[in-house]
Image (cartoon, rainbow, N blue to C red):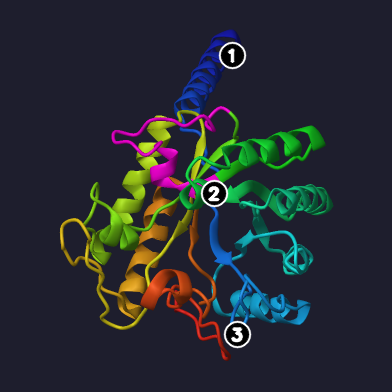
Amino acid sequence: MKQLLLLIVISMMSVVCQNASAREKAAPPVKPNALQCAAFSPYVGKLNPDYGAHPSKELIDRLLDQLVKKTPFRCIMTYGVMNGLEYTFAAAEARHLKVIAIIWLDDDIAVNSRSITAGIEVAKAYPKTIIKLSCGSEVRTRNNYAFDGEISRCISALREAGVAQPITTIDTWWEWCNRVSPCHPTNFGAQVDWIGINVFPWWENKHSDVLPCTPANKAADFHIARIEQLRRTYPGKEVILTEFGWPNGPEGGIETNKFTQQRCGVAGKKNQALVVKSTFKKLAEKGWSGVVFEAFSENWKPNEEGDFGNFWGICQGEPPYTCLRF
């Protein structure tokens, strides 16, 4: 009788173990925590990145304190590692913020060399704070293919220096598609660890003849579709939405598509809130990361982007730095 009971117990334990093993095999892999970040540039108020004074340590501290206090973001993306911006990493570390750091590249080769060297230094100095690196932002968008070599030089220098962070070059989704539809990979796909794409249906509504008409209530779906497109084009690579957003003013302002004459995007606070919140919700559902553009509005931007240029911040670029409520 004891032997029979023992056999029954052993049999039951075997079934339980088999079921547990089957559950382990069937369980889907746990997705990593998605990053929810804000693009951070301290060139607010009267500051201009093209000339004049650079942001002070006190200003960077003040802006980051406001971001932490008034928004849920505990991750930022930065646009440079020189001219006072290198202080951002110490300030971020003190506030337990994570950083995607862009090494700024442009048409001045000597400045690029200094920027790359400074990028290596901060990457090694803040390995727990700086979690990802980018060699440039929209270099192709600004310069066509003229400075592809500078991007590759930066990537190679970071590799040779032995930085630990994953590396990319950030550009618009269209550039990552090699400017063709359907999407084709670029020569940078094999060089980078992840893909950083900037997606702005607002500007597509003005400049694109491929996808020329996306209203605010469809922007989140537009963002997700572009990520999925790039994930198919670069299988195995993490794709991060490194810039997305919507202008909060001038209230009711509309751009006209230069090809179709359609008028699909309406600026305003409600539409900005709709685009930002719905996009982060859809990203979170998929376990994907995103960076809203931008943390603080910058007054110098209308020089390059017209009437809507200084309305992209989820926080105002002037005291008291009022922010969008999440």
**Residue at 19% from the left image edge and 56% from the top image edge:** 259
Which amino acid, by three-letter code, is at mark 1? Leu
Spatial CA distance of label 2 from label 3 is: 26 Å
Residue 289, image x and y in percent? 50, 51
Element under disc 2: helix
Q: Report the front residue among 5 and 141.
A: 141
The segment highlighted magenta reads: 170-190
Spatial CA distance of label 1 from label 3 is: 82 Å
First-in-chain label (2 vs 1)? 1
Please state if 239 lies on the left or on the right of 199 as rendered.
right
Residue carrying label 1 = 6
Q: Which mark is residue 139?
A: 2
First-in-chain label (1 vs 3)? 1
Please state if 109 lies on the left or on the right of 181 as rendered.
right
Which amino acid, by three-letter code, is at mark 2? Val
Viewer can see residue 122: yes
